Image (cartoon, rainbow, N blue to C red):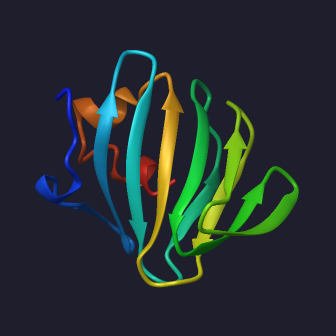
Amino acid sequence: MIDFFKADQHPYEDIGGGLSRKMVGHTNELMVVYVQFAKDAIGEVHHHEDHDQIAYVLKGSFKVQLADTMEYLKTGDAFVAPKRVSHGVVSLEEGSVLLDIFSPRRMDFLINPQASQKQAKR
C-alpha cells in the first residue's frame, strides 16, 4: 500500500450495479474505501461475520437500513455496523459517495477483486 493517497491519481473501479470504488488505504487492521453510487443503486442488506464497518456520507444522500431501523442520511452523516449487524443502503442521488471504513481490512477486496464484486456492492 502507498503512504499517500491522491484522489485524482486513482480512478474509480466499476464493480457493477451502479457502484464503483477505489481503495484509499489499508493496514492489517484497518481499510478505507470510497464507494460511489448511481441514483437508485443498491447496497443489498447483508452483514459481516468478521468486520466492523463505519460508513460516512461524503456526498449525496442514502436510505439506510441498520438492523430493524430505517434512516435517511445526507452529507456529513454516518452509520456504524458492528460485525453481524445487518445493513444496506439505497442511493437517493446520482454520484452519492460513502467512505467505508472496515476493521480489520477486507482481504477479499485485495486478493481477488473480481470475486469480491458482489461483496463490494454491500
| Quarter residue 95 falls in | bottom left
Report the residue at 39% width, 66% height from top: 36
Q: In the displayed structure, would residue 61 be above or below residue 29? A: below
Residue 61 or residue 120, whichever sits in front = 61
Residue 66 or residue 3, whichever sits in front = 3
Report the residue at 16% width, 59% height from top: 8
Please, which residue is most extreme toward the left here?
A: 9
Q: In the picture provided, is 51 more to the left or to the right than 22?
A: right
Q: In the displayed structure, would residue 78 be above or below residue 105? A: below
Q: In the picture provided, is 32 more to the left or to the right than 74?
A: left
Q: Residue 100: x percent and y percent?
A: 49, 46
Please, which residue is most extreme toward the right here?
A: 68
Q: In the displayed structure, would residue 93 be above or below residue 58? A: below
Report the residue at 70% width, 42% height from top: 80
Q: In the picture provided, is 29 more to the left or to the right than 44?
A: left
Q: In the displayed structure, would residue 116 be above or below residue 94? A: above
Q: Residue 96: x percent and y percent?
A: 47, 73
Residue 47 or residue 22, whichever sits in front = 22
